[in-house]
Image (cartoon, rainbow, N blue to C red):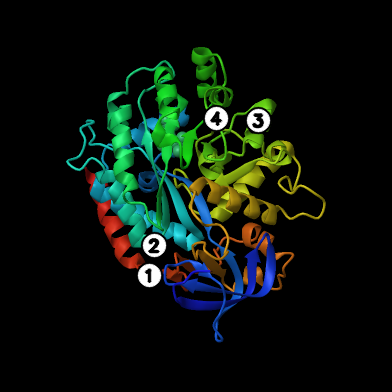
Amino acid sequence: MSDTAAVYQFSAKYLWQDAQWRRDATFGVDSDGRVAAAAGELPDYLDGWVLPGMPNLHSHAFQRAMAGLAERRGPGDDSFWTWRETMYGFAERIDPGSLQAIAAQLYVEMLKAGYTQVCEFHYLHHQPDGTPYAQPEAMSLALIEAAREAGIALTLLPVLYMSGGFDGRALSPRQRRFGHDVDGYMRLLTNLRKHESHHVRVGVALHSLRAIPESAWRGIVEHEALQTGPIHIHIAEQIGEVQDCLAKRGARPVEWLFDHAAVDARWCLVHATHLTDGETTQLARSGAVAGLCPTTEANLGDGLFPLARYLEAGGRLGIGSDSHISISPIEELRWLEYGQRLSTRHRNVAARAAGDSVGETLWREVQKGGAQAADLPIGALDVGKRADFFVLDSESPLLAARDQRSVMDSFLFAGNVSPVRHVMAGGKWVVRDFQHRDEARIAARYRMAVTRLASS
Ligand code: NGQ
Ligand code: ZN
């Protein structure tokens, strides 16, 4: 038990704990923002359904401001790669001030949707021409500051990005601001680790296999600085990159990764979209997390993850809002399940056994996998963990006449108005009655920042 004084005592009508609803559950929150044992006599009553906050395991914050700006048909065949060019053009204009303004707005939206943590896969490190900022970690600090303003827990994953393709080619001019050599990257990591706290965890991201030259790989994965903490990587999102990897390295991306790194529970393989049956089983057995971003993967035309086989093999998974074309765990989980239904022409794919609920299965799995990928004490309201939770609106029509058997599926599958009413993150009420504590100021600054970007 924590020895700091309890600042809140709660009694929840229903609390989602150990993958089931518990009636009249009590818990405390201490002054460090952690869950404490219930002690007080007069707890605040949370009248409704209370769920631990959802981790968001993949985000490129700046892309929030370009959501919707790549939906017009181009002159040729539109694809992931043409979207990427639009995205690069947008990325060029972002500086530390605009990044903070965009990220804070994004994080407010995440909290209101029930995400209480975010993994920021951050690669906009330098000035557009590749010159470091006077303070080399200025862009990372903008993200840390935005997370603090909004009140969301952050796993900052500075990205190592060295080459522009599987053949090890140099970065293109538009990629220059992403790049580091190994020493420069390790310096960044050391500097950022000084900012670690109860709210901020620093891990490692390797952008993708195509961004790390084969010759540098071993020195990186065996580097002392990479022997602890989470490691995230974009792995197999597009068929084109699977083919390229096969051509240049003689193996498919997941296959190659397993042959060249000790992939274990520290790893998160983002967009493990294109997997053979063998790779699916191997990934599931490794204990690593598959980082799925269903709305972005749909928006970009990536393909579908083999969900049923992966769950059958005991694989771990989590969700990310990635490009922020949508910021809602509800929508991520719906798309995850619906993609499977559309491609298999079956229903209730994620549920494993007769009588199992799709919503409960998915929520339980992605909460656990997300917490693992975030490497923070989150994902459940156990004593000592961060007090991150939200309360569903007990007056929401979509939850009327729902009980413990049906509420999760109705929450996830039945509506278009979010019933997330109150949100506590790190022991602070950040959202009350659907309003974030600082949303007017953060939205005003966001509007100014994107207006400036639009005219630059
Ligand atoms: C990214 N996003 O790093 O922002 C990538 C696109 C790339 C997604 N993969 C760029 N969704 O993969 O090269
Ligand atoms: Zn990504």
In the rendered structure, find residue 172 and report the number of the disc placed on it: none
Residue that numbered label 2 is attached to: 151
| Spot occupied by residue 330 in the image (x, y as percentages of width and height) | 58, 55
Label 1's element?
loop
Instruction: Mark 1 and mark 2 in contact? Answer it, CB < 8 Å.
Output: yes
- Among the two numbered marks 3 and 1 on one chain, the one whose residue lies closer to the N terminus: 3
What amino acid is at disc 4?
Ala
Q: Quadrant of residue 403?
A: bottom right
Q: Alpha-carbon distance for marks 2 and 4?
A: 34 Å
Residue at the spot 53% in from the left edge and 67% down from the top edge: 390
Residue that numbered label 1 is attached to: 437
What amino acid is at disc 2?
Gly
Label 4's element?
loop
Q: Camera-side residue: 344 or 265?
A: 265
Q: Alpha-carbon distance for marks 1 and 2?
A: 10 Å
Q: Alpha-carbon distance for marks 3 and 1?
A: 44 Å
- Among the two numbered marks 2 and 4 on one chain, the one whose residue lies closer to the N terminus: 2
What amino acid is at disc 3?
Gln
Residue that numbered label 3 is attached to: 282
In the rendered structure, find residue 262 and report the number of the disc placed on it: 4
**Mark 2 against mark 3, which lies toward the viewer?**
3
The reply to whether residue 83 is in sight is no
